[in-house]
Amino acid sequence: MTQTMAVRLRGIGKSFPGVVANHDVDIDVRAGTVHALVGENGAGKSTLMKILYGVQKPDDGTIEISGEQVVLHSPADAIKQGVGMVFQHFMLADNLTVLENVVLGAEKLYGIGDRARAKITELSDAYGFGLSPDDRVEDLGVGQRQRIEILKVLYRGAKIIILDEPTAVLVPQEVDALFGNLRELKAEGYTLLFISHKLDEVLAVADDVTVMRRGTTVASVQPKDVTARQLAELMVGSELPSPSTEESTVTEDVQLAVENVTLAGPGDRNLLDDVSLHIHRGEVLGIAGVEGNGQTELVELVMGIRPTTSGRVRLGDEDITDWSTAERRNAGIGYIPEDRHRHGLLLDFPLWENRILGHQDRSPSVRGPWINKTGARKDSARIVEQFDVRTPSIETTARALSGGNQQKFIVGREMSGDPVLLIASHPTRGVDVGAQAAIWDHIREARRRGLAVLLISADLDELIGLSDQIQVILRGRLVGEFDPDTVTPEQLGSAMTGAGEEE
Amino acid sequence: MTMAPEELRPAGAPSEALVPRRRISIWIWLLIGLALISAVRVLTGAHEVDSAGTMREAVNASVPIALAALAGLWSERAGVVNIGLEGMMILGTIGAGYFGYWYGPWSGIIGAMIFGMIGAALHALATVIFGVDHIVSGVAINIIALGTAAFLADTWFSGLQGGGPTQSPPLDAPLSITVPGISDAMIDLQDKHWFLVSDLASLVAAVTTGLSTMTILAIVLIVGSALLLWRTAFGLRLRSCGESPVAAETLGVNVYRYKFIAVLTSGAIAGAGGAFIALVSSGIYQNGQTGGRGYIGLAAMIFGNWRPGGLVMGSALFGYTDALQLRAGGEAVHALLIIVTVILLGVAVLQFRRGQKIAAITSLVIAIGFAIWFFSTDTVPADFTRMTPYVTTLLVLGLAAQRLRMPAADGLRYRRGQAG
Amino acid sequence: MGKLDLRRIGLALAAPVLAIVVALVITCLILLAAGSSVSGFLSTIFSAPAERNVINILNNASILYLSGLAAAIGFRMNLFNIGVEGQYQVAVFTAAVFAAQGWLPGPVNVVVSIVLAMVVGAVWASIAGVLKVTRGVSEVISTIMLNAIAGSLTAYLLRKVGVSTGSNLATEEIPQDSWVPGIPLLPGAPNELLGLALLAVLAGIGYAVLLNRLKFGFNLRATGTSASAAVASGIDVRRMVVVSLMISGSIAGLIGLPLLFGSSHSYGTTFQAGIGFAGIAVALLGRNNPVGIAFGALLFSYLAEQSNLLEINARVSPDIVAISQGVIVLAVVIAYEVVRRYRNALEQRQVAAQLSSSAPAEATSEATR
Amino acid sequence: AKKEEPGGAAASDELCADKSGAGPKIGLAYDIGGRGDKSFNDLAAAGVKKALDDLDATCEEAEAAQEEPDSAKEERLRTLAEAGFNPIIGVGFVYTEEVVKVAKEYPDVKFAVVDGFGEGPNVTNLVFSVEQGSFLVGVAAGLKTKTKKVGFIGGVRGPIIDPFAAGYKAGVAAVDPAITVDMKWLSDKGDAKAFANPAGGKTAATALYDAGSDVVFHASGLSGGGLFDVAATKPDGTWAIGVDADQYQTATPEQQKRILTSSLKKVDVAVFDYVKAFKDGTTKAGFDLYDIKRDGVGYSTSGGHLDDVSSKIDEYKAKLVSGELTAPSKL
Ligand SMILES: Nc1ncnc2c1ncn2[C@@H]1O[C@H](COP(=O)(O)OP(=O)(O)OP(=O)(O)O)[C@@H](O)[C@H]1O
Ligand SMILES: Nc1ncnc2c1ncn2[C@@H]1O[C@H](COP(=O)(O)OP(=O)(O)OP(=O)(O)O)[C@@H](O)[C@H]1O
Ligand SMILES: [Mg+2]
Ligand SMILES: [Mg+2]
């Protein structure tokens, strides 16, 4: 151990009301390496990184950066020490430009005018980020936002870069590009600390891996010494599940038919252009695509949140094109939204009231115009039990649950009342491996009973593993159909980016 | 505490983010507006519609509203909703009354700003440090300010010659400026009643005749704020606290400090607005003399889409219509009817071209209604002229395509150490 | 557990008590600074109200309560309805004019007038709602404008239909058989509880049931906390905006009725104004909760009533009470926050203390807010 | 850095500080604003002051709060009655109904309401024929105008201000029917915008003078301050007319040069008379009308601006007294 340590954490402890997020955490990060941090949802990874970045103050323990013990009162201190962080949830002001987001807080370096603009262009070009300084962030896709975050860190000249789940929202090509950047940065002498739930990635790029469980570090390993399965077992102490299709349950009855649907956009281009698809009872139709190519619109259109410009939507024998969202839900469409905080939950309401959401017209949570409190409570308890939602009680507010448990509750709710069609948008995003497996199992079981599923996911393994049919969406059009039994993630990836498309 | 507009977007309307931003310069809009008014003036002979006198009153009526709106801008750009503007203005009036009486008008202005800042400090303490709901704090500050001003007036002015328990003795106004040659020449030109020329002349006359130095101060404050907030590092940091305080925090910005500075500045500017009412508009302090201008200012700021140019337009619209109804009365307001008709017709055509048929027909029907009203009467009854500014504001907002966007984190609770 | 619960109760009570004490201390400091009599202030404010004052307090509290409810419905929807003031003026004016015609006999006249007032309030409020959902006009602006328009409109109509007596201008008096008799609550008092003050009780119960028991109330609260989640769940948010503003307006329509039918019997230039604005403060003080608003209304009404005597008994300007009221509103919310933080810190320390060397992190936290 | 010494202000003007008198104990209940309005509240106080001096009376005052309920007014009256004050005077018509109600509960206490219209065995309404005073200032305006155009600023349309406007208009017309009267109204409700709005008064006054009026009369309470401010900046031959009190007395020297006269409403006299009658045991229930015959209304001559025409005005006054001319009270 003669090599210098970029970061050395000793005995870090941090508790929140009711939760110990970190205790006795020890980590050594060698300078000039890529160091991965893995662990279940809620293991305390993000908290630890926030402590290293000065966002939160540790209750106990010491931090050494480049051999020097430091006390970080705020991110400003960390930045001074050469630490930069890309957060799990993007830290961007949507209404500001790329330039403004990048120079914020570092105006002293190159001003806020043309010098800064030149510097940003220079960095963007150097790493192939393709960012223009004067674009407004709200107009950009997730991949570009991710790169702004990295640019922010580079702009400040950080030498130690923390990346919290940077790949969760990226498609394979983007992940590859990101890893290319990381290797390049490592070669230039940067130290990189990154968190991921995708263990294959971890093994592919990391030099060292630290495993956290329940708030503390449980192991420190070299990628060459372990397999993904072993790593997962270290994390959760259980077997690594994988999505795999069993024998087909697809029937002849068409459950959802989308026929020549077009959704006009604000400009010349249609958001959805002549989209047609059919899902049978017992079938899972997966939609693959780079984010922002019309998936969100398709889902909202099927849910009745957006009206169609032309074309029809049919549910079973009924033409539901002009139905409201409520009517569609009452007809048996379940909906797992992509953004659970914004669309799936009332964060400050107790779980049992969240059970009512989206089921306001159906028993057991309502009776006529009245709320059926007993019914809602009882059924919430059932969901908690059946879907293994880890919560102190059903009176707990949704906000207090970790992301994975929030998601399990939503899945449980949307599977209630025997839906005929489930719209599942990124059902396992940000969810740990254990919870992921549970959600997959539930979807599969419902499918066996005849449920039709429209599955949107950025996780190609999930898509391939769960779907009976995969459609690729690109610029609002369905551009290709694949058989999940034969397709590879790479093939999908090239179709998604239009690489295989002949112009 | 207002709902995010996107859930309320009329079905099928495109999301604002995707609508290409087309910016027509504010000056062109103003010129179009002036030409329209001028045409109507020439055609109807209602020369009071934009006489120098009316314009001067309009400026005087607009300034306190614009200052209140600017105060709101500072605070809300840093993410603190400030419904307490009215209270801070009230504190400004009493400060101006006390210091203005004893130490002269400029001390009055400074006193007003300090008093406004005291109210703002309370708001900042409650919302920034204690994370209290911004609306609750603002409402409380309005109540406290009203009580405090009345209580202090009773204590301070009761025994003074010319004063009383609810009002100060007469106060001296800060210097006002008349540019000798230009003022008279322009008024002569105005009296010629030529198309557009006379209108521009009366505008120039309005700002060269008896222009209060406080009006100049207000203009400096508005332009200065625009530059400071949009052209400097300080402004960027301050605005980032209103857009995404957590992002700002992770970049080392001391969010609390910027929010504090913003709210205090807001209080000072609102106080200056109060000083204008007491020293320039009224020449005296009186209980309740702000008359809800803090709220109107808030409305003007929202009207102006949280931007300096916009809030000036909002304040001017309100100030102008308010001055017009009081100064020029029914005939001039009657002339406004035809202006409204023309604008409505324009809107109808635009809407029709955008394919919004129902909206276009609605606009057309309302336009015809106004036209009938205009051609079948000679004047608007005095009973209705009083509503002019309020109805106009509603009408304009109802017609204008609503692409308002408040700072993303406006009114949200923020606590240090919660980023990530 | 028992000990913890005691502490819990103590903490729950701590906030309001703390707030009132702080408000009093600040008020006394201001009085001291101004050289006014602190003891006179305290003894007047805390003197036992006479029976007739108790009646006044209840009467005014019931009116404030209605106003608070009207504002609270908007707040629950995340709508800042400042328009209660205009809504109640338009409504009570219409009811006064209608009831004065005496087209219907006694109590029927009253009932129909009440319904009419609610409808008028609802319609006036719906203007803001429709403007919001069709044109995206912020309800903050539109209700401010509508308040002013309502004031001008009623003044104009009053001049058209009103009759003047001396310097007063008012609508015609309501026929005597439609007066709602007072309730002689306290035999020793010369005044009586306004008969229609009972509307406040009914409205309060209605509000509680609506919000907590009815599907509609759930939809309303859901939309208020997360409009995006509401849309995804199938709630028609645009309809909710209009409907909830209409409900708010219909309750606002009730505000002036206890006075109209119980004491003034006509709407005139001296009819009490400003109740709508006071209601906003009361709603916020009561945290939009039906019981909380009742406490807020009683507290405000108590202070206002007691302050009436300040000038005569203690030579203190009654304006000081406005300061106290504002400070209480602010202090209550700050106190809640302080107590909440203290409780969190306490919990945090307990968890840390319970942690033995390698005990697993266990989520024990409940609702964090 | 000017004017009097700061501090010590509040205590010096306590009207009712001295409690040693043996005469009537007067309870005074003001409307919003109370003393300091330079109008009828101050005049009522002046009447009481005279009673303190001449009749050895003592007093207590209380004023209404913004937007208070009617019960607060009742309570104020009751508190004064309970505390042994007698007579009790409500200043402003807003007290009418409350006085009637409370007077029933205290039959031994005498009540008066300035501008009131209530009935009761122990209730006296002190009322004024303001249209007559306004008629006379209208005559003055008619005689003084060179432009044959005069102006009027009213707080609000309705029974309170209409008599001022109507009397003024009639007075002007009596001199020369060809003179036009231009009217501006500040508000449509009897609120602060009507009677405590000098900014609005300024706007209205500027508009009237700009449109050619050279004499402007206001009946708009404190808003009239705006009129005087504007008039003070105008050249010789431009006039403003005050209302209720002799507003020349409380004006600045610059304003005094432009204040032609004021339409007087002698609330002070009425209040003093009433207290005196109380002391003598001769109060009468019902309406006690102060008109031009009793010199209860009139016009002021301070400043001497009317010296050249005062004989003519007095001719009209005599005709009003004799009943040969009547001043209308409705527009
Ligand atoms: N601000 C906070 N307040 C209270 N509890 C918190 C807070 N932040 C984190 N926690 C708790 O600390 C624990 C660790 O959370 P952390 O975000 O560090 O997990 P993580 O390992 O990053 O999980 P994930 O993989 O889901 O991102 C969680 O149980 C969480 O409930
Ligand atoms: N502001 C907060 N107040 C209280 N608890 C919080 C707060 N922020 C986070 N937490 C806690 O943190 C946990 C969730 O943290 P985090 O956002 O890291 O979740 P996650 O599991 O990573 O979910 P996601 O996958 O959606 O990111 C919850 O248990 C919650 O109690
Ligand atoms: Mg995390
Ligand atoms: Mg997470």
Image (cartoon, grey):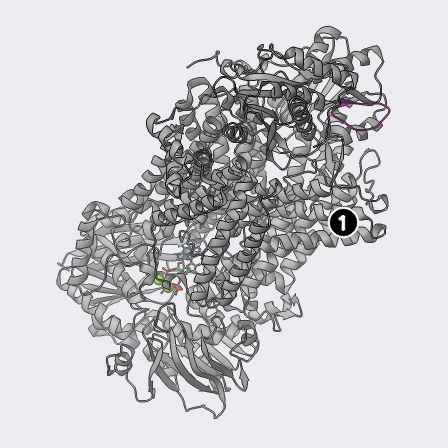
Q: Is residue A43 visible?
A: no
**Is B164 contained in the magenta span?**
no
Q: Nearer the viewer, residue C62 or D115?
A: D115
Q: Find disc 1 in the rendering and name its residue.
A: C98
Extent of the magenta region = D113-127
The amino acid type, in three-letter code, at marker 1 is: Phe
* Position of residue A457 in the picture relative to residue A30 (left or right): right
Pointer 1 residue Cβ closer than 8 Å to ligand 2: no
Would residue A501 be found to the left or right of residue C136 on screen? left
Tell me the element at label 1.
helix
Is the residue A252 above or below the residue D306 in the image? Answer: below
Q: Is-magenta flag for residue D116?
A: yes
Chain bearing tag 1 is C
* Few, some or many residues within 10 Å of mark 1 (<14, 14–19, 20+): many
Q: Position of residue C169 (x, y in %)?
A: 73, 36
Identify the residue at image location x=42%, y=91%: A248
Is residue A299 among what the camera can see? yes
Outermost bottom residue: A252
